[in-house]
């Protein structure tokens, strides 16, 4: 109470009694991280920071984004009363927070429920039963021991898969855009004669090759080689998500073996999981002290690679390669309604959780097979175009609804978010719709899914292809039938925008009459429709 009075006297927000520790406002540090390290990461950081300021407590956030992160000063961490991990991937350098009470949740909760997370974190201070950050780095075992979203094998596997996708995306995005630029400069034949061009010409001696074609070959080759790391990076960082650094080497080797076997990204997933589990088990063994130093640099890479890659080469690689080829044959045989149904499914997945795990499954499926599309199978290029187009619909639709169709249905902050969502949608950043979904999930998400399904179906029906994995309208040069693709996106955007406006107008939230529990001291439940 004294702290609250002092805060009020200074003009700062009054601090609730339950947020006071040792007579002062609570001190909380938080880490936010999502698979792509772009939108969710920073939106959660902003939401937690705003909630901390509103509550009048000392809360500092470390967003661990795709471009790296600025580590919090160790003195700030040491002075903190508790830690919030709002993450979908493993926390980097987690041992810095060792011993602190921790609340670990998916990053989406950091966006939607920041105040509740602060309450939970402060409540954990002084509670001897509260989960605490372990000192043995970012392993799945530590996450499970801490509880929260790391509370089970399924959660650990999910987190490791998202970690793998997170680290794979830069290879896909950078490599895909380089390939697209190579096509722009060197023409589409550069995919088949890049080696000949680079073998017969140099920057100082072009011979019969034009400078533009030569530069196109250079860009294409760099992008193509970047794509070669796609499956190994996926497998390596899946293993990293399960076993921390000891899993990286066995995981990369397993990914390379999956590529060699023709098992594709499915083989990379299986190989990464096998390598991660093997490395985690080996690292958990109680070995003599004189052997402990050799474990991460010799024993675990050796035995982990033998186990995971050996299983792929001798047992699992063949069946997975057969399954991959069967999937390719099925996609190649799709015509008419089958193609449209596939587009609908992909569109629904892209809009289901606005950048979450389901969205990432659809995106990983498209990008994981993009190399096959560039090699000549245009069906995969159509899938890439459908996925990117559907992913652009939610922010564009919410921008249209909140700034053009019916501004009165939205709050002032939502209208401001709507202005920014135009650019986010155009750039294929699906997460631009999250502020709207967080405030009204049951009316926004269904409307977005309908619009995404429309765009996915039309994109596939129009046979639009994309050789770029990201960039939205800004990679127009890599998209065939670009104007038809815009028509598909516009149709889905309009449908989703009018759907969300209609739901907000006519599907009102209705309070349900309180139902007494009949038990003394237990509050009655109030539900909303």
Image (cartoon, rainbow, N blue to C red):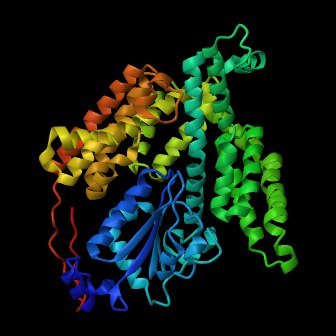
Could you say where residue 116 lies in the image, as x and y percent from the top left? Answer: 33, 73
As drawn, the residue found furthest toward the right would be 290
The image quarter in which residue 509 lies: bottom left
Q: Does residue 511 show up?
A: yes
Could you say where residue 41 lies in the image, as x and y percent from the top left? Answer: 44, 57
As drawn, the residue found furthest toward the left would be 408
Quick check: 181 above or below 427? above
Taking the spot 44% from the left edge, 27% from the top edge, the residue there is: 460
Taking the spot 42% from the left edge, 51% from the top edge, the residue there is: 39
Rendered-image quadrant of the N terminus:
bottom left
Quick check: 20 above or below 77? below
The image quarter in which residue 25 lies: bottom left
Could you say where residue 295 lies in the image, as x and y percent from the top left? Answer: 81, 68
Residue nearest the viewer, comparing 221 with 201: 201
Quick check: 18 above or below 306? below
The image quarter in which residue 247 lies: bottom right
Residue nearest the viewer, comparing 240 with 261: 240
Residue nearest the viewer, comparing 198 with 407: 198
Classify residue 390 as left or right of residue 493.
right
Taking the spot 18% from the left edge, 44% from the top edge, the residue there is: 502
Classify residue 126 as left or right of residue 219.
left
Rendered-image quadrant of the C terminus:
bottom left
Residue nearest the viewer, comparing 112 with 509: 112
Classify residue 422 as left or right of residue 263.
left
As drawn, the residue found furthest toward the front would be 204
Could you say where residue 365 lies in the image, as x and y percent from the top left? Answer: 55, 40
Classify residue 172 as left or right of residue 513.
right
Taking the spot 44% from the left edge, 82% from the top edge, the residue there is: 81
As drawn, the residue found furthest toward the top would be 208
């Amino acid at each position: 109470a004294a702290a609250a009075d002092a805060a009020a006297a200074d003009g700062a927000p009054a601090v609730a009694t339950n947020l006071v520790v040792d007579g002062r406002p609570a001190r909380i540090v938080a880490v936010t991280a999502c698979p792509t390290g772009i939108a969710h990461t920073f939106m959660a950081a902003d939401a937690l920071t705003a909630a901390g300021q509103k509550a009048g407590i000392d809360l500092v956030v470390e967003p661990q984004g795709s471009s790296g992160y600025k580590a919090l000063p160790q003195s700030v961490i040491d002075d903190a009363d508790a830690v919030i991990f709002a993450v979908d991937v493993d926390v980097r350098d987690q041992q810095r927070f060792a011993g602190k009470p921790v609340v670990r949740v998916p990053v989406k909760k950091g966006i939607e429920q920041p105040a509740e997370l602060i309450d939970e974190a402060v409540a954990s201070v002084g509670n001897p039963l509260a989960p605490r950050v372990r000192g043995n780095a970012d392993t799945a075992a530590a996450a499970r021991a801490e509880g929260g979203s790391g509370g089970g094998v399924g959660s650990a596997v999910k987190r490791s898969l998202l970690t793998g996708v997170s680290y794979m995306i830069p290879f896909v995005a950078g490599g895909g855009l380089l390939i697209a630029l190579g096509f722009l400069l060197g023409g589409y034949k550069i995919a088949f004669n890049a080696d000949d061009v680079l073998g017969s010409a140099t920057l100082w001696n072009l011979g019969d090759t034009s400078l533009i074609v030569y530069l196109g070959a250079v860009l294409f080759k760099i992008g193509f080689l970047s794509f070669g790391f796609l499956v190994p990076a996926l497998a390596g960082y899946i293993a990293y998500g399960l076993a921390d650094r000891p899993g990286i080497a066995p995981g990369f080797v397993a990914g390379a073996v999956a590529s060699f076997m023709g098992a594709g990204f499915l083989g990379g997933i299986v190989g990464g999981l096998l390598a991660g589990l093997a490395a985690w088990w080996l690292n958990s063994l109680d070995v003599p002290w004189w052997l402990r130093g050799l474990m991460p640099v010799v024993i675990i890479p050796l035995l982990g690679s033998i186990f995971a890659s050996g299983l792929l080469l001798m047992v699992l690689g063949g069946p997975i390669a057969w399954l991959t080829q069967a999937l390719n044959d099925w996609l190649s045989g799709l015509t008419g309604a089958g193609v449209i149904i596939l587009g609908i499914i992909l569109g629904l997945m892209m809009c289901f959780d606005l950048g979450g795990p389901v969205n990432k499954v659809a995106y990983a499926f498209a990008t994981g097979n993009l190399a096959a599309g560039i090699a000549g199978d245009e069906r995969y290029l159509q899938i890439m175009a459908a996925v990117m187009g559907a992913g652009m619909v939610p922010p564009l639709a919410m921008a249209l609804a909140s700034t053009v169709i019916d501004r009165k249905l939205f709050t002032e902050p939502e209208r401001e978010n709507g202005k920014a969502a135009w650019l986010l949608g155009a750039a294929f950043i699906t997460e631009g719709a999250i502020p709207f979904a967080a405030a009204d999930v049951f009316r926004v998400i269904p409307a977005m899914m309908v619009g995404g399904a429309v765009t996915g179906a039309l994109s596939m029906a129009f046979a639009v292809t994309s050789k770029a994995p990201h960039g939205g309208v800004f990679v127009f040069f890599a998209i065939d039938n670009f104007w038809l693709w815009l028509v598909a996106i516009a149709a889905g955007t309009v449908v989703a925008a009018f759907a969300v406006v209609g739901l907000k107008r006519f599907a009102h939230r209705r309070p349900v009459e309180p139902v007494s529990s009949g038990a003394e001291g237990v509050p009655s439940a109030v539900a909303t429709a």
